[in-house]
Image (cartoon, rainbow, N blue to C red):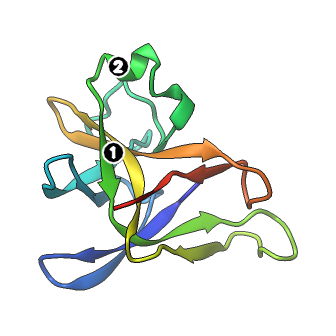
Amino acid sequence: MCNGGIYLDITTNKLIKVFFPIPNIVIPVIDEKGLYFLCQWGQRESDKELIRELPITGWTRLESLEKEYWKKHNPKKVIIPFKSFFEKDKNDPLYPKNKSTEFKLEENKSLQGLLIEHEKKNLVYVITKPIQNWIHDRHPVVEVN
């Protein structure tokens, strides 16, 4: 489901590692105009300025994008330019418990996100799709830049 990622901070030219459980964590997004900016990754119960009408999660299902609870917030698809993403491993001999495995993205690929521009703050949710034979039953949607 993508519980973290690594991105290049364009202001410092350093790689930054982020994980969703960190309260109010921000990640980069690129909008349809090509603008690059940092945005809060979803919501957690512990967040300051919790927006009650939005889900408390960092992900959304691709198949839910047409639902009313998203439509009423005028969502926009964005690119999340992670260099790699992390998946929390399930309890399996191949995947040690409570560890995260890094999956590098090819140079021309990024994750898809859903941007919600709210009066209090902007939030982005990683878009996921169903998948079989993977660590989990969902995988982030990857797109070619």
Crowdedness near tag 2: few (<14), some (14–19) or many (≥20) residues, C-alpha within 10 Å: few
Residue indicated by mark 1: 124
Please state the total of marks drawn on the protein image: 2
At which x and y percent is residue 92? 85, 68
Q: Residue visible at 57% across and 76% down?
A: 102
Give the image location of residue 58, x and y in percent.
Answer: 45, 45
Question: Residue 26 is drawn in which quadrant?
Answer: bottom left
Q: Quadrant of the C terminus?
A: bottom left
Give percent across and percent down for residue 4: 48, 65
50 or 37, which lies in front?
37
Q: Earlier in the sequence, mark 2 or mark 1?
A: 2
Residue 40 visible in this rendered orientation of the protein: yes
23 lies left or right of 128: left
Of marks 2 and 1, the one in the foreground: 2
What residue type is disc 2 on?
A: Lys
User: Which of 135 and 48 lies nearest the eye of the viewer?
Assistant: 135
**Residue at (46, 75) in percent of width and height:** 106
Q: Residue at x 52, y 36 (%)?
A: 62
To which quarter of the image does residue 103 belong? Answer: bottom right
Residue drawn where x is 45% and y is 21% of the image: 66
CA gap, disc 2 and disc 1 = 14 Å
Q: Is residue 42 left or right of residue 142?
A: left
